[in-house]
């Protein structure tokens, strides 16, 4: 079993409920054990500003799925929850599930970049990841604790949960 961390994000169609539903789906993943989910946060959009605020969080699972099987499962959940892939880059979405980390593996192919390419600058990923894995060190040796200290958290608000 491999430790995997998955970022959750949504900003359409009742995003908070979308995340709760996604968590229920993640608990049902095949060949996997549910770990936990971070507190959820509200965050202003990174990228185009003419879209609603996001709800973000990070989930932890242990899995025997390989990274591409896990990606397939995550994309199935996104589609089940009404995700429509648009051509617009960085547009709004009902649900985004990003594979952040798959053990200490570094993966770079046509479908998958792990660790997730943007995670080291994104407070809405780093802060919830730190909440559930404060001692985590990324494959490149950077400590989550240090990345969190450096990131801009002014647009991130914890939702009571
Ligand atoms: N901005 C925030 N705050 N949260 C996200 O999950 C998120 N996801 C995205 C883009 C459009 C880059 N901006 C985001 O994909």
Image (tube, helix red, strand yellow):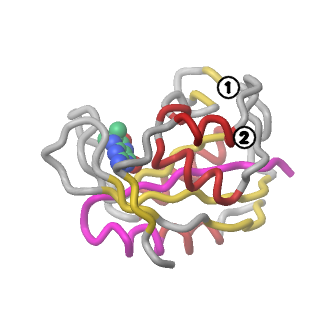
Disc 2 packing (10 Å; few <14; some 14–19; many ≥20) = many
> Which residue is rendered at x = 66% and y = 45% of the image?
69
SS class, disc 2: strand
Q: Between 99 and 45, which is closer to the camera in this rendering?
A: 45
Q: Does the residue labelled 2 lie within 8 Å of ligand 1?
A: no
- Quadrant in which ligand 1 is drawn: top left
Q: What residue is rendered at 28% in x and 46% in y?
A: 45
Task: Say whether residue 42 is left or right of residue 8.
Answer: left
Q: Residue drawn at (59%, 43%), measured in percent from left and top? A: 99
Residue 143 % position (x, y): 72, 35
Q: Which of 80 and 6 is in front in this view?
A: 6
Vertically, is 35 above or below 138?
below
| Labelled pair 2, 1 in contact (Cβ < 8 Å) | yes
In the drawing, what numbered circle is on residue 50? Answer: none
Question: Where 30 sits versus 121, above or below?
Answer: below
Quadrant position of residue 26 = bottom right
Q: Residue 13: x and y, percent?
A: 25, 68
Instruction: Name the residue beneath numbered marker 2.
Output: 102
Q: In this view, does 132 lie to the left or right of 52?
A: right
Ligand 1 has an atom within 8 Å of the beta carbon of the residue at disc 1: no
Count of picture labels = 2
The verdict on residue 86 being magenta is no
- Residue that sits furthest to the bottom in the current view: 161
Furthest residue toward right: 1
Give the image location of residue 97, x and y in percent.
49, 51
Front-lying residue, 143 or 52? 143
Residue at the disc numbered 1:
107
Q: Which residue is drawn at 33% across and 67% down?
A: 15
- The earlier-in-sequence mark between 2 and 1 is 2
- The span picked out in magenta is 1-21
Instruction: Give above or below for 109 relative to 74.
Output: above
């Amino acid at each position: 079993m491999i430790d995997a961390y998955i970022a959750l994000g949504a900003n359409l169609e009742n995003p908070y409920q979308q995340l709760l539903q996604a968590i229920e789906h993640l608990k049902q993943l095949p060949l996997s054990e549910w770990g936990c989910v971070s507190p959820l946060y509200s965050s202003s959009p990174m990228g185009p500003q003419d879209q609603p605020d996001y709800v973000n969080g990070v989930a932890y699972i242990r899995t025997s799925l390989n990274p591409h099987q896990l990606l397939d499962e995550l994309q199935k959940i996104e589609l089940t929850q009404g995700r429509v892939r648009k051509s617009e880059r960085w547009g709004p979405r009902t649900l985004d599930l990003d594979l952040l980390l798959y053990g200490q593996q570094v993966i770079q192919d046509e479908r998958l970049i792990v660790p997730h390419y943007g995670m080291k600058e994104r407070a809405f990923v780093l802060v919830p990841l730190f909440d559930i894995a404060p001692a985590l060190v990324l494959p490149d040796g950077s400590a989550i604790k240090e990345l969190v200290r450096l990131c801009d958290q002014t647009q991130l608000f914890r939702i009571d949960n």
